Image: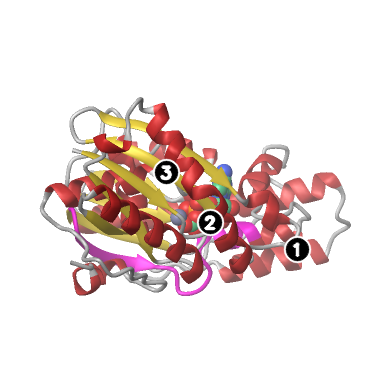
Amino acid sequence: MRVLGIETSCDETGAAIYDSEKGLLAHTLYSQVDMHAEYGGVVPELASRDHIRKIIPLVHAVITQAELTSADIDGVAYTVGPGLAGALLVGATVGRSLAFAWNVPALGVHHMEGHLLAPMLEPDPPEFPFVALLVSGGHTQLIKVTSMGNYEILGESLDDAVGEAFDKTAKMLGLGYPGGAALAKLAEQGNPERFHFPRPMVDRPGLDFSFSGLKTFAVNTAAAHELDEQTRADIACAFQIAVVETLIIKCRRALRLTGLKRLVVAGGVGANRMLREHLAEAMGKEGAIVYFPRHEFCTDNGAMIAYVGCQRLLAGEQSDLAVRVFPRWDLEDYSLRNPT
Ligand code: KG4
Ligand code: ZN
Protein backbone atom coordinates (compact mmCIF):
# COMPACT_ATOMS: atom_id res chain seq x y z
CA MET A 1 0.00 0.00 0.00
CA ARG A 2 1.29 3.47 -0.94
CA VAL A 3 0.17 6.30 1.30
CA LEU A 4 0.51 10.04 0.80
CA GLY A 5 1.17 11.77 4.13
CA ILE A 6 0.48 15.46 4.76
CA GLU A 7 1.68 17.50 7.74
CA THR A 8 0.53 21.09 8.39
CA SER A 9 0.05 21.28 12.17
CA CYS A 10 2.36 24.22 12.85
CA ASP A 11 4.94 26.09 10.77
CA GLU A 12 6.18 23.35 8.46
CA THR A 13 4.44 22.02 5.38
CA GLY A 14 5.41 18.40 4.80
CA ALA A 15 4.45 15.77 2.23
CA ALA A 16 5.73 12.22 1.78
CA ILE A 17 4.86 8.87 0.25
CA TYR A 18 5.35 5.68 2.26
CA ASP A 19 5.10 2.24 0.69
CA SER A 20 4.29 -0.70 3.00
CA GLU A 21 6.64 -2.91 0.96
CA LYS A 22 9.44 -0.56 -0.07
CA GLY A 23 9.44 1.97 2.77
CA LEU A 24 9.73 5.71 2.26
CA LEU A 25 9.60 6.59 -1.44
CA ALA A 26 9.78 10.40 -1.29
CA HIS A 27 9.48 13.26 1.14
CA THR A 28 9.67 17.01 1.02
CA LEU A 29 9.33 19.84 3.49
CA TYR A 30 8.87 23.58 3.39
CA SER A 31 9.69 25.48 6.58
CA GLN A 32 7.98 28.80 7.31
CA VAL A 33 10.53 29.60 9.98
CA ASP A 34 11.99 32.65 8.19
CA MET A 35 8.53 34.16 7.76
CA HIS A 36 7.69 33.84 11.48
CA ALA A 37 11.17 34.80 12.72
CA GLU A 38 10.55 38.53 12.42
CA TYR A 39 7.58 38.20 14.81
CA GLY A 40 9.55 36.16 17.35
CA GLY A 41 7.12 33.23 17.16
CA VAL A 42 4.58 31.48 14.96
CA VAL A 43 1.72 33.71 13.75
CA PRO A 44 -1.18 31.25 13.26
CA GLU A 45 -3.00 33.15 10.51
CA LEU A 46 0.18 33.55 8.46
CA ALA A 47 0.94 29.87 8.97
CA SER A 48 -2.46 28.78 7.62
CA ARG A 49 -2.18 31.03 4.57
CA ASP A 50 1.29 29.78 3.76
CA HIS A 51 0.26 26.11 4.08
CA ILE A 52 -2.46 26.86 1.48
CA ARG A 53 0.17 28.23 -0.90
CA LYS A 54 2.61 25.36 -0.46
CA ILE A 55 0.69 22.14 0.04
CA ILE A 56 -0.45 21.34 -3.52
CA PRO A 57 2.99 22.03 -5.09
CA LEU A 58 4.58 19.80 -2.39
CA VAL A 59 2.13 16.97 -3.07
CA HIS A 60 2.96 17.24 -6.78
CA ALA A 61 6.65 17.24 -5.92
CA VAL A 62 6.58 13.99 -3.89
CA ILE A 63 4.48 12.16 -6.47
CA THR A 64 6.97 13.20 -9.17
CA GLN A 65 9.98 12.41 -6.95
CA ALA A 66 8.64 8.90 -6.37
CA GLU A 67 8.08 8.54 -10.12
CA LEU A 68 4.40 7.81 -9.57
CA THR A 69 1.10 9.28 -10.68
CA SER A 70 -1.90 9.99 -8.47
CA ALA A 71 -3.39 6.68 -9.67
CA ASP A 72 -0.62 4.86 -7.72
CA ILE A 73 -1.69 6.33 -4.35
CA ASP A 74 -3.75 3.88 -2.26
CA GLY A 75 -4.54 6.12 0.71
CA VAL A 76 -4.08 9.62 2.14
CA ALA A 77 -3.10 10.44 5.73
CA TYR A 78 -3.01 13.93 7.23
CA THR A 79 -2.36 15.39 10.67
CA VAL A 80 -5.62 16.28 12.46
CA GLY A 81 -4.14 17.28 15.83
CA PRO A 82 -2.76 18.52 18.09
CA GLY A 83 -1.71 21.81 16.56
CA LEU A 84 -2.97 25.15 15.27
CA ALA A 85 -6.61 24.83 14.19
CA GLY A 86 -6.31 26.83 10.97
CA ALA A 87 -3.06 25.16 9.96
CA LEU A 88 -4.48 21.67 10.65
CA LEU A 89 -7.58 22.51 8.61
CA VAL A 90 -5.47 23.16 5.51
CA GLY A 91 -3.85 19.71 5.54
CA ALA A 92 -7.03 17.93 6.61
CA THR A 93 -9.16 19.61 3.92
CA VAL A 94 -6.64 19.03 1.15
CA GLY A 95 -5.89 15.45 2.28
CA ARG A 96 -9.55 14.48 2.69
CA SER A 97 -10.47 16.04 -0.66
CA LEU A 98 -7.64 14.35 -2.55
CA ALA A 99 -8.64 10.98 -1.10
CA PHE A 100 -12.25 11.61 -2.17
CA ALA A 101 -11.19 12.66 -5.67
CA TRP A 102 -8.87 9.66 -6.03
CA ASN A 103 -11.45 7.30 -4.51
CA VAL A 104 -9.05 5.96 -1.87
CA PRO A 105 -9.38 5.77 1.95
CA ALA A 106 -8.36 8.73 4.11
CA LEU A 107 -7.13 8.86 7.69
CA GLY A 108 -6.60 11.64 10.23
CA VAL A 109 -3.35 11.08 12.15
CA HIS A 110 -2.17 12.20 15.61
CA HIS A 111 0.90 14.43 15.21
CA MET A 112 2.60 13.11 18.35
CA GLU A 113 2.08 9.51 17.28
CA GLY A 114 3.93 10.53 14.13
CA HIS A 115 6.88 11.80 16.20
CA LEU A 116 6.75 8.75 18.45
CA LEU A 117 6.99 6.30 15.56
CA ALA A 118 9.42 8.31 13.38
CA PRO A 119 12.31 5.96 14.35
CA MET A 120 10.36 3.23 12.47
CA LEU A 121 11.47 4.96 9.27
CA GLU A 122 15.10 4.04 10.00
CA PRO A 123 16.83 0.88 8.73
CA ASP A 124 17.06 -0.71 12.20
CA PRO A 125 13.76 0.19 13.89
CA PRO A 126 12.94 -0.61 17.55
CA GLU A 127 10.62 -3.45 18.45
CA PHE A 128 7.66 -2.96 20.79
CA PRO A 129 7.49 -2.45 23.74
CA PHE A 130 9.71 0.56 24.40
CA VAL A 131 9.90 3.76 26.41
CA ALA A 132 9.71 6.96 24.37
CA LEU A 133 11.07 10.36 25.35
CA LEU A 134 9.06 12.90 23.40
CA VAL A 135 10.80 16.26 23.42
CA SER A 136 9.34 18.91 21.13
CA GLY A 137 8.38 22.57 21.17
CA GLY A 138 5.07 21.79 22.87
CA HIS A 139 5.61 18.47 24.64
CA THR A 140 7.96 16.80 27.11
CA GLN A 141 6.72 13.32 27.91
CA LEU A 142 7.96 9.89 28.85
CA ILE A 143 5.63 7.32 27.35
CA LYS A 144 5.41 3.55 27.64
CA VAL A 145 4.62 2.26 24.17
CA THR A 146 3.31 -1.31 24.31
CA SER A 147 2.07 -1.48 20.74
CA MET A 148 0.86 0.91 18.10
CA GLY A 149 -1.91 3.00 19.67
CA ASN A 150 -1.21 1.67 23.16
CA TYR A 151 0.39 4.60 24.95
CA GLU A 152 0.77 5.21 28.67
CA ILE A 153 2.12 8.58 29.78
CA LEU A 154 4.64 7.88 32.57
CA GLY A 155 5.57 11.49 33.18
CA GLU A 156 5.42 14.93 31.58
CA SER A 157 6.35 18.55 32.02
CA LEU A 158 4.31 20.43 34.58
CA ASP A 159 5.11 23.73 32.86
CA ASP A 160 7.31 24.58 29.85
CA ALA A 161 8.19 21.93 27.29
CA VAL A 162 11.95 21.39 26.79
CA GLY A 163 11.86 22.90 23.30
CA GLU A 164 9.98 25.90 24.69
CA ALA A 165 12.63 26.37 27.41
CA PHE A 166 15.35 26.14 24.75
CA ASP A 167 13.52 28.70 22.60
CA LYS A 168 12.87 31.16 25.44
CA THR A 169 16.46 30.95 26.69
CA ALA A 170 17.74 31.35 23.13
CA LYS A 171 15.55 34.41 22.62
CA MET A 172 16.88 35.93 25.82
CA LEU A 173 20.42 35.36 24.51
CA GLY A 174 19.48 37.17 21.29
CA LEU A 175 19.48 34.06 19.12
CA GLY A 176 16.14 34.58 17.36
CA TYR A 177 13.24 32.13 17.04
CA PRO A 178 13.10 29.15 17.20
CA GLY A 179 16.48 29.17 18.85
CA GLY A 180 17.01 25.59 20.05
CA ALA A 181 19.53 24.67 17.36
CA ALA A 182 21.27 28.07 17.57
CA LEU A 183 21.58 27.74 21.36
CA ALA A 184 23.11 24.28 20.95
CA LYS A 185 25.65 25.70 18.49
CA LEU A 186 26.57 28.60 20.78
CA ALA A 187 26.90 26.16 23.71
CA GLU A 188 29.79 24.44 21.90
CA GLN A 189 31.91 27.56 22.52
CA GLY A 190 30.93 27.69 26.21
CA ASN A 191 32.96 26.84 29.27
CA PRO A 192 31.06 24.08 31.14
CA GLU A 193 32.82 24.94 34.43
CA ARG A 194 31.74 28.59 34.69
CA PHE A 195 28.06 28.28 35.67
CA HIS A 196 26.15 25.48 37.34
CA PHE A 197 22.42 25.39 36.65
CA PRO A 198 19.95 23.34 38.76
CA ARG A 199 18.65 19.95 37.57
CA PRO A 200 14.93 20.50 38.17
CA MET A 201 12.83 17.87 39.99
CA VAL A 202 15.47 15.16 40.02
CA ASP A 203 15.32 14.89 43.84
CA ARG A 204 11.61 14.17 43.75
CA PRO A 205 10.35 10.71 42.93
CA GLY A 206 8.37 10.20 39.75
CA LEU A 207 8.86 11.01 36.11
CA ASP A 208 7.42 14.51 35.76
CA PHE A 209 9.53 17.42 34.54
CA SER A 210 9.63 21.16 35.14
CA PHE A 211 11.69 23.48 32.97
CA SER A 212 10.39 26.97 33.62
CA GLY A 213 12.63 27.41 36.69
CA LEU A 214 15.68 26.54 34.63
CA LYS A 215 14.73 29.17 32.07
CA THR A 216 14.30 31.72 34.90
CA PHE A 217 17.71 30.70 36.30
CA ALA A 218 19.20 31.46 32.88
CA VAL A 219 17.47 34.86 32.78
CA ASN A 220 18.73 35.72 36.27
CA THR A 221 22.27 34.60 35.45
CA ALA A 222 22.22 36.73 32.30
CA ALA A 223 20.94 39.75 34.26
CA ALA A 224 23.77 39.43 36.79
CA HIS A 225 26.56 39.51 34.19
CA GLU A 226 27.93 41.58 31.35
CA LEU A 227 26.54 39.71 28.33
CA ASP A 228 29.63 39.45 26.17
CA GLU A 229 29.97 36.67 23.58
CA GLN A 230 31.78 34.28 25.95
CA THR A 231 29.26 34.78 28.77
CA ARG A 232 26.37 34.09 26.38
CA ALA A 233 28.10 30.88 25.28
CA ASP A 234 28.78 29.89 28.91
CA ILE A 235 25.09 30.39 29.82
CA ALA A 236 23.97 28.39 26.77
CA CYS A 237 26.41 25.64 27.74
CA ALA A 238 25.27 25.47 31.40
CA PHE A 239 21.62 25.48 30.33
CA GLN A 240 22.10 22.69 27.79
CA ILE A 241 24.04 20.49 30.22
CA ALA A 242 21.35 20.93 32.89
CA VAL A 243 18.60 19.96 30.42
CA VAL A 244 20.50 16.95 29.08
CA GLU A 245 21.42 15.64 32.55
CA THR A 246 17.83 16.07 33.78
CA LEU A 247 16.48 14.15 30.79
CA ILE A 248 19.07 11.40 31.32
CA ILE A 249 18.12 10.97 35.00
CA LYS A 250 14.42 10.67 34.14
CA CYS A 251 15.00 8.31 31.20
CA ARG A 252 17.12 6.02 33.40
CA ARG A 253 14.36 6.04 36.00
CA ALA A 254 11.71 5.24 33.37
CA LEU A 255 13.70 2.26 32.04
CA ARG A 256 14.28 0.89 35.54
CA LEU A 257 10.62 1.36 36.46
CA THR A 258 9.29 -0.42 33.37
CA GLY A 259 12.09 -2.96 33.11
CA LEU A 260 12.40 -2.11 29.41
CA LYS A 261 15.71 -1.87 27.57
CA ARG A 262 14.71 0.18 24.55
CA LEU A 263 14.41 3.96 24.55
CA VAL A 264 13.11 5.94 21.59
CA VAL A 265 13.79 9.67 21.43
CA ALA A 266 11.47 11.73 19.28
CA GLY A 267 10.56 15.36 18.61
CA GLY A 268 12.56 18.43 17.60
CA VAL A 269 14.88 18.49 20.64
CA GLY A 270 15.91 14.95 19.66
CA ALA A 271 18.05 16.67 17.02
CA ASN A 272 20.28 18.03 19.82
CA ARG A 273 23.73 16.50 19.43
CA MET A 274 24.72 16.59 23.08
CA LEU A 275 21.47 14.90 24.06
CA ARG A 276 21.99 12.20 21.43
CA GLU A 277 25.57 11.46 22.48
CA HIS A 278 25.17 11.63 26.25
CA LEU A 279 21.87 9.76 26.33
CA ALA A 280 23.22 6.94 24.15
CA GLU A 281 26.24 6.61 26.43
CA ALA A 282 24.29 6.77 29.70
CA MET A 283 21.60 4.32 28.59
CA GLY A 284 24.28 2.01 27.20
CA LYS A 285 25.53 1.67 30.78
CA GLU A 286 22.02 0.47 31.71
CA GLY A 287 22.24 -2.18 29.00
CA ALA A 288 19.67 -0.28 26.96
CA ILE A 289 19.65 0.83 23.33
CA VAL A 290 18.57 4.32 22.30
CA TYR A 291 16.84 4.83 18.96
CA PHE A 292 16.79 8.24 17.29
CA PRO A 293 15.15 9.24 14.04
CA ARG A 294 17.57 10.90 11.61
CA HIS A 295 17.83 14.68 12.20
CA GLU A 296 15.28 15.73 9.58
CA PHE A 297 12.67 13.35 11.01
CA CYS A 298 13.10 14.65 14.57
CA THR A 299 11.38 17.91 13.65
CA ASP A 300 8.02 18.08 11.90
CA ASN A 301 7.78 16.21 8.61
CA GLY A 302 5.35 14.41 6.32
CA ALA A 303 7.18 11.07 6.38
CA MET A 304 6.13 10.21 9.95
CA ILE A 305 2.49 10.97 9.06
CA ALA A 306 2.65 8.82 5.91
CA TYR A 307 4.17 5.98 8.00
CA VAL A 308 1.52 6.07 10.74
CA GLY A 309 -1.24 6.51 8.14
CA CYS A 310 -0.03 3.49 6.21
CA GLN A 311 0.04 1.23 9.30
CA ARG A 312 -3.41 2.30 10.45
CA LEU A 313 -5.01 2.16 7.00
CA LEU A 314 -3.57 -1.33 6.56
CA ALA A 315 -5.19 -2.26 9.87
CA GLY A 316 -8.52 -1.22 8.36
CA GLU A 317 -9.03 2.18 9.96
CA GLN A 318 -10.30 5.09 7.95
CA SER A 319 -11.93 8.48 8.43
CA ASP A 320 -15.39 9.36 7.17
CA LEU A 321 -16.05 12.22 4.75
CA ALA A 322 -16.18 14.97 7.38
CA VAL A 323 -13.16 17.23 7.77
CA ARG A 324 -12.44 17.40 11.50
CA VAL A 325 -9.41 18.66 13.39
CA PHE A 326 -8.46 18.31 17.07
CA PRO A 327 -6.18 21.20 18.09
CA ARG A 328 -5.95 19.78 21.63
CA TRP A 329 -5.70 16.03 21.68
CA ASP A 330 -3.92 13.89 24.28
CA LEU A 331 -2.11 10.85 22.97
CA GLU A 332 -3.73 8.74 25.68
CA ASP A 333 -7.17 9.68 24.33
CA TYR A 334 -6.38 8.29 20.91
CA SER A 335 -9.25 5.86 20.75
CA LEU A 336 -11.72 8.38 22.11
CA ARG A 337 -11.48 10.70 19.18
CA ASN A 338 -9.81 8.78 16.40
CA PRO A 339 -12.17 9.62 13.56
CA THR A 340 -13.59 6.48 12.01
O1 KG4 B 1 8.98 18.62 17.09
P1 KG4 B 1 9.15 20.03 16.66
O2 KG4 B 1 9.63 20.28 15.25
O3 KG4 B 1 7.86 20.87 16.78
C1 KG4 B 1 6.85 20.60 17.64
O4 KG4 B 1 6.02 19.71 17.30
O5 KG4 B 1 6.84 21.26 18.69
O6 KG4 B 1 10.17 20.68 17.70
C2 KG4 B 1 10.60 22.01 17.60
C3 KG4 B 1 11.45 22.32 18.82
C4 KG4 B 1 11.78 23.80 18.92
O7 KG4 B 1 11.54 24.19 20.26
C5 KG4 B 1 13.27 23.86 18.58
O8 KG4 B 1 13.95 24.93 19.18
C6 KG4 B 1 13.76 22.52 19.11
O9 KG4 B 1 12.72 21.62 18.74
N1 KG4 B 1 15.04 22.11 18.50
C7 KG4 B 1 16.18 21.95 19.22
C8 KG4 B 1 17.19 21.58 18.29
N2 KG4 B 1 16.63 21.52 17.05
C9 KG4 B 1 15.31 21.85 17.21
N3 KG4 B 1 16.43 22.07 20.54
C10 KG4 B 1 17.68 21.83 20.96
N4 KG4 B 1 18.71 21.49 20.15
C11 KG4 B 1 18.51 21.35 18.81
N5 KG4 B 1 19.53 20.99 18.02
ZN1 ZN C 1 6.07 18.28 16.08
Quadrant that contains the N terminus = top left
Q: Nearer the viewer, mark 2 or mark 3?
A: 2
**Magenta stretch contains residue 100:** no
Tag in front: 3 or 1: 3
- The type of residue carrying mark 1 is Thr
Q: Which residue is mark 3?
A: 15
Mark 1 Cβ inside 8 Å of ligand 1: no
Mark 2 or mark 1, which is nearer to you? 2
What residue is drawn where x is 50% and y is 74%? 159
Q: Nearer the viewer, residue 71 or 278?
A: 71
Residue range (magenta): 148-167
Residue at image mark 2: 52
The relative height of residue 287 versus residue 327 in the rendered view (above or below) is above
Q: In the rendered view, does 27 fall on the left or right side of 222?
A: left
**Residue receiving disc 1:** 221
Towards the viewer: 325 or 69: 69
Tags 2 and 1 touching, CB below 8 Å: no
Identify the mark nearer the N-term, 2 or 1: 2
Q: Could you tell me if residue 290 is visible in this image?
A: no
Q: CA distance from mark 3 to mark 1?
A: 42 Å
Residue 163 found in image quarter: bottom right
Q: Position of residue 179 (x, y in %)?
A: 66, 52
Q: Residue at x 25, y 55 (%)?
A: 106
- Can you say which quadrant of the picture contains the C terminus? bottom left
Measuring from the top left, give residue 73's x and y in whole percent.
Answer: 26, 39
- Judge: label 2 CB < 8 Å from ligand 2: no
